[in-house]
Amino acid sequence: MDLTLEPSEQAFRDELRAWLEMNNPGPGPEGPDQQFEFRREWQHKLQEQRFAGLSWPPEFGGRGATLMEQAIFGEEITRARAPMPANVLGLVMGGPVVIAHGNAEQKARFLEPILNASEIWCQGFSEPDAGSDLASLKTRAVKVDGGWKVTGQKVWTSLAQYAKWMMLLARTDPDAPKHNGLSYMILDMKQPGVQVRPLRQITGESEFNEVFIEDAFVPDENLIGEVGQGWSVGITTLMFERAGIALASAMTIKQELGELATLIRERGMDADSVIRQRFGALVVHAETMRLNSYRGLSQAIRTGIPGPEGSMAKIQWADINQGLTELAMDVKGADAPLADPVWGYRLLRARANSIEGGTSEIQRNILAERVLGLPKLR
Amino acid sequence: MRFDLSDEQKAIQSAARDFLGTRYDIRKVRELAETGNYDVSIWGEIADLGWTGLAIADEFGGQGLGMVELAVVLEEFGYALAPSPFLSNAAAGLLLQRAGSAAQKQRWLPAMASGKATATLGVLDGKGRALVPDAGIASVIILVDGQAARLVEGPVDKSTRVETLDLTRHYYPVEGEDGELLEGDVSGGMDLAEVALAAELVGVSQRAMEMAVEYAKVRTQFGRPIGAYQAVSHRCSTMLLETESARSATLYAAWAADSHPEAAPMAASVAKVAAADAGWHVTASALQVHGGIGFTWEHDLHLLLKRAKVDGHIFGSVSAHRERVAELSGLPSLVPEGVQGL
């Protein structure tokens, strides 16, 4: 047991913290489009310091950061309440996939525009009939001369309205067992066969889209990895992002608990022992989530592979966010029903936390099957 | 950063698992529980292994190891469900070492390190009484009252032993207003005692979870192992989550006690709450997974369930620790100025 940072990690954190203090652009303008352009500018600043594409090897414009440095980055950018870069999906998923599985031409074509946010990426995995059972997805890619004709529908696609490229999982062999019939390809969003419609959430806003794909064309050179390998290409990279994200999420929760403590005081509820007990229980839960995340990170650093333990922090994150916003509503008492851009919004938004990125039920399946070795029902 | 045991710590863990697993085979645990005994000969072996002095400083004849090493051993005592005064003696040693005077430490710690004497500890309730584990054999009893603690001579008369839910540990009601004060950092010492208790609870949770998972793999209903049903497997996943959370919190609190003192008070309270909650939730959930057989006296699960329940109610209360966590996280103190809390 030794939870102190190495001198190099300490130096990285200090450098980053100092830089963020000088350069944090703040919350930015209202309105989704204005906000997106603001974050594109922010990404340019991050890129100048090689803080965009942090994990990417230096030859592709990254910093070659260790897992620990990535986690520190997530924690610090959250601590500073600085915005996330615009092309976040390209940076944490698309780029690493191209680096790990792409050929030299693909690396030359796709990586630089991800880093400088001139080409935005979105992810086309989930479908209306393929949520938790992602590998059953139905979007078809049929071989044609020089490429693939793609038809299908994707959903929960964030950034699709800004995206030039979609990381697409499509079925190239309908006769193969379901995980083996998928291929990973990069779809040009700016073509007539691709239509993007915003999806309105229970919060009233639209963070996500539906994407309708009809006879869209993907040239052969945009296939990543081999035909039929799409599942392993797409899924392996997801796990590597968990460690860093878990610590950033733990930091966000810590900040929101601080805001909740302020709300409790402002509302004169700080002598209410029921409220205090519930608050204390949430802090305990949040602290164990943070510590579980550090333990998972430590293991990933030593073994090189993030374990299924990341599923624990994901379950906890959703539970804590939901409990935290429910407590805030009780603290607000008679004002709780009023529309409120902070706690009312968060209460609703938190309902998605136990669904997005793999439901809490799927995470429990992963723990049961892969950690505890319990039999599969399927 | 290494949030994991070092190779030396893993060696201690594996030695403890082997030793306690053979000495406290579950049949032996049941026999001791049902006859109301500890096994004095095993205590002698534990002392010979140096574990009684594990976290006691070299100058008092101990091994001078840290809280992490002690937590590792205590988790194994919990896992074995060993009927033994090891926890009470270790917790009292931690408190004495942190809060005792030089003379008090010189008088008691060497005998405790060698295993020749034992000490124990109890927290007084509002009526000046404490339910104290192992007070019938302890040479000295520490009674804690808020920020104050006193040394009371032991042992108490063995006939005063009271029946508790936990058959594997012996409890005695002790009253007392007299005795030598411990003039040092009682609060810091109690934090160490709570971490020790949390470590035992992690071991109890781990054992119950393993029993439930094994049973869910072999028990068949409707033509399948019950662990294939999500109603059961998700229950097991939640046990894993709570056990690992308690373990993370306990290891962190132990490390903070050794190496990062400014985080130690909060970490100790978090560990106590997480481990006490996990202990009960996991053992109760394991009973549910076992179904009817888990409710029988002949099954061993109830021994774990009862240990977990009673452990969750000794030393500081869980609600007091939750309250302390709330106060350390931005809520104003409820205690009027000049009066010390917990």
Image (cartoon, coloured by chain):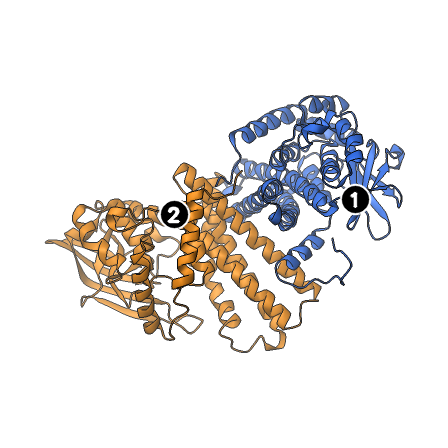
Chain colours: A orange, B blue
Q: Amino acid at mark 1?
A: Glu
Q: Report in which chain the residue with disc 2 lies.
A: A
Q: Can you tell which quarter of the image residue B185 is in?
A: top right
Please tell me how many numbered marks the rendered image carries: 2
Q: Quadrant of residue A302?
A: top left
- Residue A284 position in % (x across, y down): 60, 53
Q: Chain of mark 1?
A: B
Task: Give residue A349's position: percent from left, percent from top.
Answer: 47, 66
Q: Is residue A148 visible?
A: yes
Q: Residue at x 61, y 49 (%)?
A: B262
Residue situated in front as seen by the camera: B225 or B179 = B179
Identified by mark 2, the residue type is Met
> Tag 2's secondary structure?
helix
Q: Residues within 10 Å of mark 2 (few under 14, many from 20)?
A: some
Q: State the mark number for residue B183.
A: 1
Residue A239 got which mark?
A: 2
- x and y, in percent, of residue A276 in the image: 66, 62
Front of the two marks 2 and 1: 1
Mark 1 crowdedness (10 Å alpha carbons): few <14, some 14-19, many ≥20: some
- Are the residues flagged by discs 2 and 1 from a single subunit? no
In the figure, B122 relative to A152: above or below? above
Q: Secondary structure at mark 1?
A: loop
